[in-house]
Image (spheres, rainbow, N blue to C red):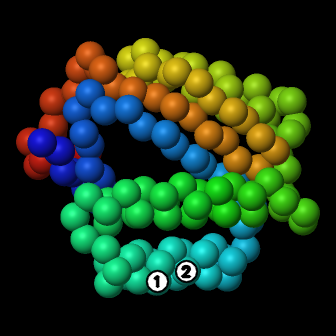
Amino acid sequence: MADFFQRNLPHYHQPNATYFITFRLAGSLPVEIWKNLKEEYEQEKRNLATRHSGAKLQEERYNLQKRHFARFDALLENDEGSPRWLAEPQLADIVQRELHTLSPEHYNLHSYCLMPNHCHLLINQQDIQEPPLPIDGKH
């Protein structure tokens, strides 16, 4: 069962889960392009739901998710005019050091790819002890 907690945004935490995370620099993808991509994805999901159900719907949603991620990633890689701070060795070193600093206390870092304007990382939380929740139940 996923734990739910909320700070500024809701968080769902699957215990012992593996996560693939992408984070990007502010300005690396214009807001309008990001919104259009998201709207296209949501519309395609709705279209799938009208044509498929059950296991076939799940398979098609998975394939759609992969195609959506590929489009998103291609837009990030075509970084013309995008901030490229992570191409600066001093800044890339800071990010790299921090990724390793949090492992293994908060996650097990399997791999990561640091690019000029974004980063992909693969982590898991197998055998990571959750800190106790504060009395108010929020982190």
Residue 70: x, y in percent?
Answer: 65, 56
Tag 1: amino acid: Gln
- Structural distance between the alpha carbons of marks 1 and 2: 5 Å
- Outermost residue on the left side: it is 135
Which residue sits at x=17%, y=44%?
3
Residue highlighted by disc 2: 40
Residue 31: x, y in percent?
Answer: 66, 76
Q: Quadrant of the N terminus?
A: top left
Which residue sits at x=19%, y=51%?
4
Residue 101: x, y in percent?
Answer: 54, 19
Q: Is mark 1 on a helix, strand or loop?
A: helix
In the image, residue 43 above or below residue 12:
below
User: Residue 103 has which mark?
Assistant: none
Q: What element carries label 2?
A: helix
How crowded pointer 2 is (Cα within 10 Å; few <14, some 14-19, many 20+) is rated as: few
Residue 19 placement: quadrant? top left
In the image, residue 58 above or below residue 98:
below
Q: Nearer the viewer, residue 16 or 47?
A: 47
Residue highlighted by disc 1: 43
In the image, residue 102 above or below residue 26:
above
